[in-house]
């Protein structure tokens, strides 16, 4: 039986990643998310991400996001769209408010494996931080309620970066 996003589902995600920015800065990332998908396909969620840069002159930062989205399924495709508002806190620097728009789809390859491809646009009026990020991931459904996903992201815009990560997804 295929494991898919189903109505009335709470999901908890935890992950780690490494981001290489402009070929000069490396940031270790730790992330946590909580979301609920309603019977009608609408999604509410929140997430937090802590960044640990490899240079002491670059401040550590924390990001918080609140997300509203929608998802559905068409055969083996599970398209989704989300809009998020976020807060970026940096040590000893002013906070930054931002927004992000995500469009993507999961594709169920078979009962155990899936792919996940998405695009994210992020911007703020506070600083020069507009980005376009493309993500591709491959996931494995360990059980009906647990999946593990590896992903790669490529960012263009006011800076360039490559991001590699792994995420554990628990559904209840």
Image (cartoon, grey):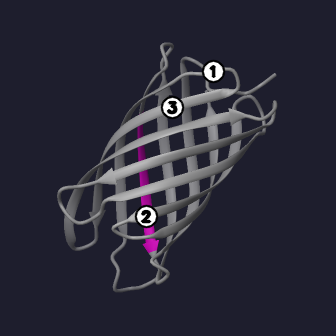
- Image point 29% across, 63% down: which residue? 129
Q: Position of residue 53 (x, y in %)?
A: 44, 76
**Which residues are the magenta region?**
45-52
Give the numbered dot on residue 80. Answer: 3
Residue 33, x across and y down, in percent: 48, 43
- Residues 102 and 54: in front is 102
SS of the residue at dot 3? strand
Report the residue at 37% width, 72% height from top.
Answer: 60
- Name the residue that disc number 2 marks: 156
Disc number placed over residue 74 in the picture, else none: 1
- In this image, 159 relative to 138: left or right? left
Q: CA distance from mark 3 to mark 1?
A: 11 Å
- Per the model, the C-alpha gap separating discs 2 and 1 is 30 Å
Location of residue 119 in the rendering, given as x and y in whole percent from the top left corner: 48, 47
**Within-10-Å neighbours for mark 1: few <14, some 14–19, many 20+:** few
Q: Callout 2 environment at 10 Å: few (<14), some (14 to 19), or many (20+)?
A: some
Per the model, the C-alpha gap separating discs 2 and 3 is 22 Å
- Residue 1 position, x and y percent, is 81, 22
Q: Main secondary structure of the magenta part?
A: strand
Q: Residue at x 38, y 70 (%)?
A: 159
């Amino acid at each position: 039986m295929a494991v898919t996003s189903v109505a009335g589902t709470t999901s908890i995600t935890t992950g780690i990643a490494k981001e290489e920015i402009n070929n000069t800065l490396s940031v270790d990332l730790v992330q946590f998310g909580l979301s609920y998908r309603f019977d009608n396909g609408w999604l509410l969620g929140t997430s937090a991400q802590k960044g640990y840069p490899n240079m002491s002159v670059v401040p550590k930062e924390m990001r918080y996001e609140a997300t509203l989205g929608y998802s559905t399924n068409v055969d083996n495709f599970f398209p989704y769209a989300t809009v998020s508002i976020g807060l970026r806190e940096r040590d000893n620097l002013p906070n930054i408010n931002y927004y992000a728009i995500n469009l993507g789809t999961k594709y169920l390859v078979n009962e155990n494996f899936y792919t996940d491809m998405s695009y994210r646009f992020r911007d703020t009026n506070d600083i020069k931080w507009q980005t376009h990020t493309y993500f591709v991931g491959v996931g494995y459904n360990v059980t009906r309620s647990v999946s593990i996903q590896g992903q790669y992201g490529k960012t263009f815009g006011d800076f360039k970066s490559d991001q590699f990560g792994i995420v554990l997804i628990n559904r209840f």
